């Protein structure tokens, strides 16, 4: 139970950093290579945490790139990652 609580806290901190803009999507993808908590975070939750990307835009980005709602960061391919980075830059 303690481990699960620690993982939830880490994910909450990660989402807060995204929300505040102190970590970019690019940096998050790089961090996922060495951090299991980041790697196992759902892509939809990550996108919804980005400034200027709400629930609707996040789902639209996922759909446009053929990414299922249940996909986790570690399951993204290089092209999908790049496409999401480009998609979040557009206004």
Image (cartoon, helix red, strand yellow):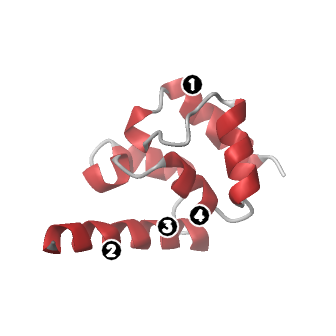
Question: Could you tell me how far apart the alpha carbons at marks 2 and 4 are, in whole angstroms?
Answer: 15 Å
Q: Work out whether mark 3 precedes mark 1 in sequence or the reverse, and give the earlier one.
A: 3
- Dot 2 falls on a residue whose secondary structure is helix
**Residue that badge 3 annotates:** 15
CB within 8 Å, label 1 to label 2: no
**Residue that badge 2 annotates:** 9
Residue appearing at x 47%, y 32% in the figure = 76
Q: Work out whether mark 3 precedes mark 2 in sequence or the reverse, and give the earlier one.
A: 2
CB within 8 Å, label 4 to label 3: yes
**Residue that badge 1 annotates:** 79
Q: Position of residue 54 (x, y in %)?
A: 72, 61
Instruction: Please identify the residue farthest to the right as the structure is shown.
Output: 91
CB within 8 Å, label 2 to label 4: no
On the rendered structure, is 23 left or right of 8?
A: right
- Dot 4 falls on a residue whose secondary structure is helix
CB within 8 Å, label 3 to label 2: no
Q: Along the line of sight, which residue is nearer the eye, 20 or 54?
A: 54
Residue appearing at x 84%, y 52% in the figure = 91
Q: Work out whether mark 4 precedes mark 3 in sequence or the reverse, and give the earlier one.
A: 3
Residue appearing at x 40%, y 52% in the figure = 41
> In the rendering, which numbered label is found on residue 49?
4
Q: Along the line of sight, which residue is nearer the eye, 34 or 58?
A: 58
Task: Give the mark toward the camera: 1 or 2.
Answer: 2
- Category of crowding for the residue at label 4, using alpha-carbon neighbours closer than 10 angstroms: few (below 14), some (14–19), many (at least 20): many
On the rendered structure, is 1 left or right of 16?
A: left
- Dot 1 falls on a residue whose secondary structure is helix
Question: Could you tell me how far apart the alpha carbons at marks 4 and 1 are, in whole angstroms?
Answer: 21 Å
- Look at the image and tell me whether residue 26 can be seen: yes
- Look at the image and tell me whether residue 21 can be seen: no
Question: Could you tell me how far apart the alpha carbons at marks 4 and 3 are, in whole angstroms?
Answer: 6 Å
Residue appearing at x 59%, y 63% in the figure = 49
């Amino acid at each position: 139970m303690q481990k699960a609580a620690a993982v939830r806290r880490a994910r909450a901190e990660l989402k807060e950093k995204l929300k505040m803009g102190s970590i970019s999507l690019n940096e998050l993808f790089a961090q996922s290579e060495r951090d299991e908590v980041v790697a196992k975070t759902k892509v939809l939750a990550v996108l919804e945490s980005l400034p200027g990307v709400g629930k609707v835009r996040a789902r639209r980005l996922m759909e446009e790139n053929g990414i299922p709602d249940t996909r986790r960061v570690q399951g993204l391919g290089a092209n999908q990652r790049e496409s999401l980075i480009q998609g979040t830059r557009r206004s």
